[in-house]
Amino acid sequence: QIPKIKFNDGLEIPQVGLGVFQMDDFEETKQSVLNALKVGYRHIDTASFYDNEEAVGAALAETDVPREQIFVTTKLWSNVRGYDNVKAQFKTSLKKLGLDYLDLYLIHWPAPGYEEVWRAFEDLHDEGLIKSIGVSNFTDAQLDNLLKGARITPVIDQIETHPYLQQDNMHQYLADHNIVHEAWSPLGGGSNNVLSNDKVNEIAEKYGKSAAQVVLRWHLQRGEVIIPKSTHLEQIEQNIDLFDFALTDDDMATIKTLNKNLRVGPVPDDPAWLKESMKFGNQAEQA
Ligand code: A2P
């Protein structure tokens, strides 16, 4: 049984989910989601940008796990802006996922026009089509701006977070605003070497766990939601087998010293990146 974290809207999210970023192959994605559900995951995180909503939907259609027990997140890419376009794109995502409601919809990046996107999200929420609404890659300044005109406070901000990018300022900001901190690339994306860090491996040895499990456990003890990505059954299983050990305060303090503000992804408030992100993306629906 995976612990759940309560949102500011009263609903809950399973603290561990399967991320499916960079799963490009239909069958592999479908099988990874089915494997995850089989070993106990009840939370899947996709995005229209990943171009695999249909594969996730195929797994959701095939599994024996009842719909209401599974928490599904998808995201709106930056190439869709404008109230009516957002609503049309949402319906396309819902259809690809084969669902009649979505648990969580996120604005993928804070590209210009996100205020109007949020109004469409609020109305889709009122219509009962989305249970909870949130954002991704928003900085504190962008959240301040969004909150000024918002009827509904985002439940979550999904931001790059791992031991080499600990995001302490955002972590505190989100706690102060009762917005859940969700970590993308919780393992550092596999492209930096946090999993081969000596200190992480010393801690792992002490508990008979893997470096990945120590890093994921560090996130959990900070109160974050995590969505580690893997296509390998053994790792999918490992990444949810986190509840039979606990890091000590000393372990947590040791990992705290590893921060080096090293990003694997784009700088979230870089105007050039945000502008660029509006030019690509797939499957945009125009209303
Ligand atoms: P793979 O996709 O080959 O299964 P993140 O979620 O931080 O973006 O990290 C994803 C990367 O980490 C992927 O390359 C994934 O490999 C790898 N990974 C996922 N789980 C584990 C694990 N338990 N041990 C080692 N590497 C892992």
Image (cartoon, rainbow, N blue to C red):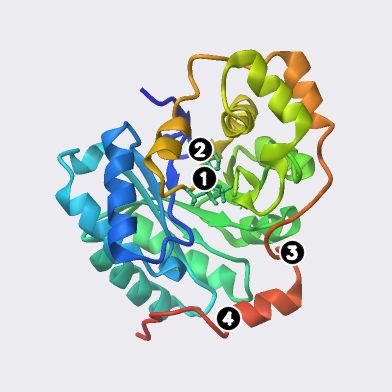
**Contact (Cβ within 8 Å) of mark 3 with mark 4:** no
Which residue is located at x 81 percent, y 49 percent? 261
Residue 278 marker? 4
Tell me the amino acid under the disc marked 4.
Met
* Quarter of the image that includes the N terminus: top left
> In screen coordinates, is 92 left or right of 110?
left
Label 4 crowd (10 A; few <14 / some 14-19 / many >=20): some
State the residue position of label 2. Answer: 8
Q: Earlier in the sequence, mark 1 or mark 3?
A: 1
From the viewer's perspective, is 247 left or right of 23? right
> Residue 27 location, x and y as percent?
27, 60
Please give the name of the residue rendered at 44% of the width and 76% of the height, measured from the top-left corner.
83
Which label is found at residue 155?
1
- Measured in 3D between alpha carbons, the distance from the residue under mark 2 to the one under mark 1, in whole angstroms, is 6 Å
Which circle's residue, 3 or 2, is located before the other in the chain? 2
Label 2 CB-ligand 1 distance < 8 A: no
Question: As shown in the figure, which amino acid type bears the numbered disc 1?
Answer: Val
Q: Is residue 267 above or below residue 259?
A: below
Distance CA(mark 1)–CA(mark 3):
22 Å
Question: Given this view, does label 1 or label 3 mark the residue nearer the observer?
Answer: 3
Q: Quadrant of the C terminus?
A: bottom left
205, above or below 44, in the image: above
* Residue at figure coordinates x 23%, y 40% from the top left: 68
Q: Gap in Å between the C-alphas at discs 3 and 4?
A: 15 Å
Local SS, label 4:
loop
Does dot 3 land on a helix, a strand or a loop? loop
**Distance between mark 1 and mark 4 Cα atoms:** 24 Å
Is residue 11 among the parts visible in the rendering?
no
Q: Is residue 4 above or below residue 268?
A: above
